[in-house]
Amino acid sequence: VTNAAGCTSAASANVVIGAQPVTPYAPIVGTITQPTCSTATGSVILSGLPSGNWTINPGAITGSTASTTLSGLTASTTYNYTVTNAAGCTSAASTNVVIDAQPVTPSAPIVGTITQPTCSVVTGTITVTVQNAGETYSFDNGVTFQSGNSKSGLAAGSYNVMIKSTGGCTSAPSTVTLAVPNCNNIDLVVVETVNATIVIVGQTVIFTIVSTNNGPDNATGTLVAVKLPSGYTFVSSSTTTGTYDPSTGEWKIGNLNNGATETLTITAIVNSTGIYAITSVIQSNQAETTYVNNTSMVELIPTDFFFPDAFSPNGDGYNDKFVIIHDGSLKLDFEVYNRWGNSVYKSSDYQNDWDGKGTGNFLGTDLPNGTYYCTYKVIKIATGEFILNGIKYITLRR
């Protein structure tokens, strides 16, 4: 500095002007975790935080990492966060962090009406009070849920009933007991069997239905419903007592005393298409304590079997051999006769290799064009059992 007399002082100490502090960017909003049925608060991950020490507001949360998780956020609240760096500079606000309301967990169901099983109706009904619109209801301890608050067709036993809210929260269970009715002391049993395990289309099978009253009381008006499904054609039936009507499928037994057993047999032919499961259901005028053995079912699955009626062994690579389609667990005994009744081809284990040449007295001979008569038997390889036999006409044309 210089005074009025023109005299100048010595220089002052250095005055240093630092760089302007950097204002941090607004925090970057990452994953938001919303409140759940069991957790009342939410959380958010914030990243893009400045290096060094920082403070996040609201909450005056401090730290020095590039990202952080803010927990305990109040439900039904919107947050905007700013960050202040070590230099005291504060960022703009983040995007909104919206914390939803916590899903409501329903109260345990209030049981309304209970219809207990009776001797005439062996199942009951449970109805619970509706708490809120849109809720669903479980009558099997939360395994399945339905829209209606009432469930019918329930057998005697203990049931845990639960409610699920529209937000997916499940209530505590309410336990309901359906009591076993005190009914007549009868126990009807039906057992259905069939005389075959492997069948092919066109085979004749016999179903045997055995009905028993294990008592100790007698049963009256006993009836067995056993109607052949579309996979079979009825041939005949016989009963040890009562009558069977194949058109209705009703076997009317009538009285079935304690310890008595009666039998129905149904003979049928297996069709190429249709339903092959046949079910028998027994009932009487008296209700029973248990119905677990009142139904019996068997199902046969026909194997593929196709017997052609012509082939052309002319060496053109098409239809040159006579091919019978059948299950690999079966074999065929196959014999062919000409118009004069002479055996011209025979195989006890046919391998789909007949090319129009004869066997026996006609060995190696190209059989002439024409219609041939043949017989066949289908045999189970494992047991040697004959399960089907038939007669066919075959046209051979080269």
Image (cartoon, rainbow, N blue to C red):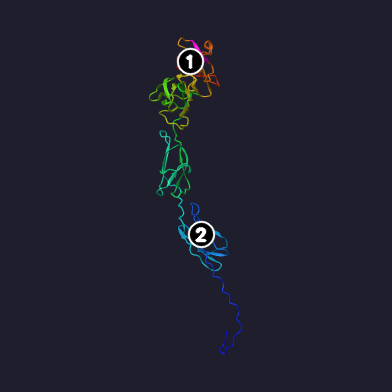
Please state the horizontal and vertical placement of residue 84, each as a whole percent of the image.
53, 66
Q: Amino acid at mark 1?
A: Thr
Instruction: Measure how far apart labels 1 and 2 are at the Cα level.
Output: 86 Å
Q: Residue at x 43, y 43 (%)?
A: 146
- Mark 1 vs 2, N-terminal side: 2
Residues shaded magenta: 342-346
- The dot on residue 286 is none
Please state the horizontal and vertical placement of residue 58, each as a whole percent of the image.
50, 64
**Which of the 4 image quarters holds residue 115?**
top left
Q: Amino acid at mark 2?
A: Ile
The residue wearing badge 1 is 375
**Which of the 4 image quarters holds residue 124?**
top left
Q: Are marks 1 and 2 in contact (CB under 8 Å)?
A: no
Q: Secondary structure at mark 2?
A: strand
User: Does 279 appear above or below 146?
Assistant: above
Decide: few, some or many residues near mark 1? Use Cα within 10 Å; few <14, some 14-19, many ≥20: some
* Whether residue 188 can be seen here: no
The residue wearing badge 2 is 28
